[in-house]
Amino acid sequence: MAIDPVKLLERLIACPSVTPEEAGALDLLEAELKGLGFAVTRLRFEGDGSYPVDNLFATRGEGRRRLLFAGHTDVVPPGDAAHWTADPFQPRIADGRIYGRGAADMKSGIAAFVAACAAIPPEAGIIQLAITNDEEADAINGTEKLVRWMAENGHHFDFAIVGEPSSAETLGDSIKIGRRGSFSGSVTVTGTQGHVAYPHKANNPLPVLAAVATALSSEPLDGGSAHFPASNLELTSIDVGNPVSNVIPMSGVLRFNIRYNDLWTPGTLADWVRGRIAQVEANGTRVDFEIAGVPSRSFLSPLGADIETLSAVIAERNGKAPDYSTGGGTSDARFIAQYGPVVECGLVGPSMHKADEHIALSDLTGLAEIYEGFMRRFFAGNPA
């Protein structure tokens, strides 16, 4: 049974699946996948301080090799509808493009992969899909728990593709073979509140806070690695909550984020931060450092035959092999990388999260062709 990726994407966009409400998107996929012979399991995870999330796992086929496709149906809120040309959840086709929230990020990747699966016979090999509705927000009860459940239930994979937008300027010009990690923290400096006219009766935390800011940001963490750019620390806030000019504040908080490469782990970064803070003279104040949230680990997939196969398929289509990128923020691929090799291969995404989000229809059908071509070679055991 053939599936038109454009028609499927239209139906997915029409589901207003703002995190964590799946709004019928997973129901739609379940029906489509069952029609293709997939066994579908719906999984609802909750707890750990976050909202409940519906997830979907599907598997079909037989053979030696196992391919996993992963993605998310949830989207960010559309914002003020007045900034959109039309209803963000009413798909609109114009001038060779399809518009709607989720068109680029990343219902298009799911539509392309499902369409590609329809062209692959079940006996070719084992295809698995891991679809969450919790990537754009907390990402606690989504892919991380879904792939853990897969491993616990014997659903292993040889290679995985995440359909996130990965192309830079044109379809297939770049695939992501890794991602930087994200580490956020705060430093609180506590002194003694007082009147600015009597500084000897107070202890101003601001000079120490400023010194901490300088210590953290004055030197680079590293010079980059083989596949990653240099790690960078950015100060994001310094706040004492003091609206007046005649009071020495009692305390102040500095917040920062580090996007880091494969030279670091959350543990070594925490040690580095503590070491930089220790160089600052506290001057009688108390200095406290806390890690904010759960750090996202960096990862780099091992380069091998399957990445070469994907690169070869893209090169034959485009006349040029894709660049291997590790740029951008974090994605759910970081959870999948703990269980096997994974790359991100998807569309061009400059309009994602914006009003009038859109993609080119030719890119959508082209991505489905890339996925299909890769699967045929992957299951045939022909690496390039």
Image (spheres, rainbow, N blue to C red):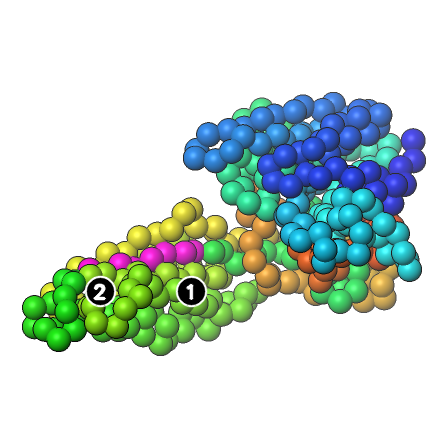
The residues colored magenta run 183-190
Quadrant of the frame with the N terminus = top right
- The mark that comes first in sequence, 2 or 1, is 1
Q: Image check: 3 left or right of 156?
A: right
Q: Nearer the viewer, residue 375 or 186?
A: 186
Question: Callout 2: few (<14), some (14-19), or many (20+) C-alpha neighbours within 10 Å?
Answer: many
Q: Position of residue 52 (x, y in %)?
A: 54, 30
From the top left corner, tell me how far across and down residue 306 is, in percent.
71, 49
Determine which quarter of the picture holds residue 123.
Answer: top right
Compute the Cα span from label 2 to label 1. 20 Å
What amino acid type is highlighted by mark number 1? Answer: Thr
Q: Is residue 361 magenta?
A: no
Mark 1, residue position: 236
From this view, report whether residue 1 is shown above or below residue 322: above
- The total of numbered circles placed on residues is 2
Q: Position of residue 323 (x, y in %)?
A: 70, 65
> Compared to 98, does 24 lie above or below?
above
User: Which residue was labeled with disc 2?
Assistant: 249
